[in-house]
Amino acid sequence: MATPTSQVPAAQRPRRQRESGPGVNFGRVLKSEWIKVTTIPSTVILIATTVIVMVGIAALLAWQTTFLFDAQSNPEMAAQMQGAPDAAEISRDIPGSGLIFGQLLMASLAVVLIASEWGTGMIRSTMVAVPNRTSALLAKQLIMAVISFLVGAGSALISYFIAQPILGSADLGFSLDADGALLHIINTGSVLALVSVFAMSVGTLIRNTAGGVVTSIGVLLVLPILVAIFGGSTEWVADAARFLPSSGGEQMVATTIQDGDFNQWQGALILGGWSLLLLAVSLVVTKKRDV
Amino acid sequence: MIEAQALSKRYGAKTAVDAVSFTVHPGKVTGFLGPNGAGKSTTMRMIVGLDNPSGGRVTVNGKPYAQHRAPLREVGALLDAKAVHTKRSAYNHLRAMAATHGIPDSRVRDVIELTGLGPVAKKRVGGFSLGMGQRLGIAAALLGDPHTVILDEPVNGLDPEGVQWVRHLAKGLASEGRTVFLSSHLMSEMALTADHLIVIGRGRIIADAPIQSIIDGQGRARVRVRADRPQDLLGSLAGEGVSSQILEPELIEITGVDARRIAEVALRERVLVYELTPLQVSLEDAYMQLTQTEVEYQSHDLPNVQDAAEQVPAPVEGR
């Protein structure tokens, strides 16, 4: 493609001065990463999808719970449904009920944002501009974690308000200051934030979008299923499984804590511990490896 | 100013760059010339800190690249075209790069204008031709108005107008007192653009000299001779430090003595000479001579192509 090129004489170009302009600092790197995150179409698409899916699942579950409530209110049917969870208990979990899908989508976005830089070669531009590397990665992690938190907590809050009229028809409504309700909503965001750090660190280490998505989804969502299938009979597996990142996340959004289970804060320590460990490893490795 | 001291890069058992030392001075265009795989790109990546050297060190404007407070204002580098996210527009790419150094949007628009990217600036980079990608890379390199400009194969994929533009740009930047370091595997391009040449082959510096002295230094007199008894002629010249190459039974190339001397000897020995052509050494030839033993990936003529070439009369040489 032939393009007219303006040949600006040297004298008209901005004059050069020694050590003239501002240098790199974290605020500027943050702004740069913000521009990068918001100028890729997949970001907007995945965020919108996440919110729609999470709210949709919550609305469906709320609707379904009203049927369960009706059934349990009927003494005859309730007798047949012995052992089934109580509708009132389920209704408390509704705001964050789309969390699994939220994790799937936001973990994918986190991996895509970093691994696509390697895939496209953009990472070389990034690291030439920010040669200490760590601040570029931290800025991206921070932006993605904040976005994930807002998507998670926001979706849960919207879900709450959409679910209330549906639940109200069956007398299952509850207020935001009900025991644990607000923490459940906030922690739906916190889980997504920590999961995004986890996934982005995996993406940083693997440097490949497909590999990063498969690995992080595998650890976060498939591993607990495998453990449930094969580890049920072995006690030490069940014990160890409580320390999986996914188990930590589950406890963070739990509205009722069973005896002997970790509480919300302990759950946060487990998931947060995994995320921070991987983050630290990814920073050290990226600092050392050639780009 | 770029200074490399015993800079090395090894990948496992393979040495890509082998203890090279050189200095690239401001105020002129320095060409970095070498065959594919000679270590040009690896050296340039080490200069801007993307690859860690296995040994030695390299500084830009007195400091290792990563230690500069505002690296993009010190060094602008085009390392490979399309070090850009394909889904992002050229404008947003440059804006993101500029943001790291607080470079204003006006400068982003300036470099877009300067590189002729205006009409496509808002389009996604994924759809760019190789030439447009190169222009974007050059725009990114110029963002910080840097003192040192490093361009790796900048004319790759550019149209003739673009090639000429890069040539003007490089010379213009050098004339403003900046350090300009550009790599190429094309000798002819370097002959037109560079003031100074660093020639690299298999990771080693083969030559580091002003372009004219590289032409002169390698340009030993070479003469093509057609004679009826070339062996006798060579025998008589043997004492004079010549080397020769027999191309055909009656066609030889003699290096080391000039045409007049050959004619004298031929007259004395009564050898019939029916062609005596002094061959001028082009920069291309000088380069081939310098690097012929240093080529990493040597190509060989296809057998049938060679046969065909033998039937065609030898092209007229001597430029």
Image: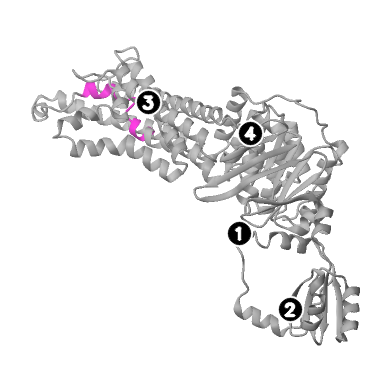
Q: Which is nearer the N-term, disc 2 or disc 1?
A: 2
Q: What separation in Å lies between label 4 and label 2 (alpha carbons)?
A: 56 Å
Q: What stretch is highlighted in magenta?
A: A87-102
Residues at marks 3 and 2, common chain? no
Read off the chain for label 4: A
Q: Position of residue B82 (x, y in %)?
A: 62, 47
Q: Is mark 4 on a helix, strand or loop?
A: helix
Packing grade of label 2 (10 A; few <14, some 14-19, many >=20) is some
Q: Are marks 2 and 1 on the same chain?
A: yes
Q: Which amino acid does label 3 sit on?
A: Val
Main structural element of the magenta stretch: helix, strand or loop? helix
Q: What residue type is labelled 2?
A: Ile
| Mark in the foreground, 1 or 3 | 1
Quarter placement of the C terminus of chain B: bottom right
Residue carrying label 2: B246
Tag 3 residue: A191
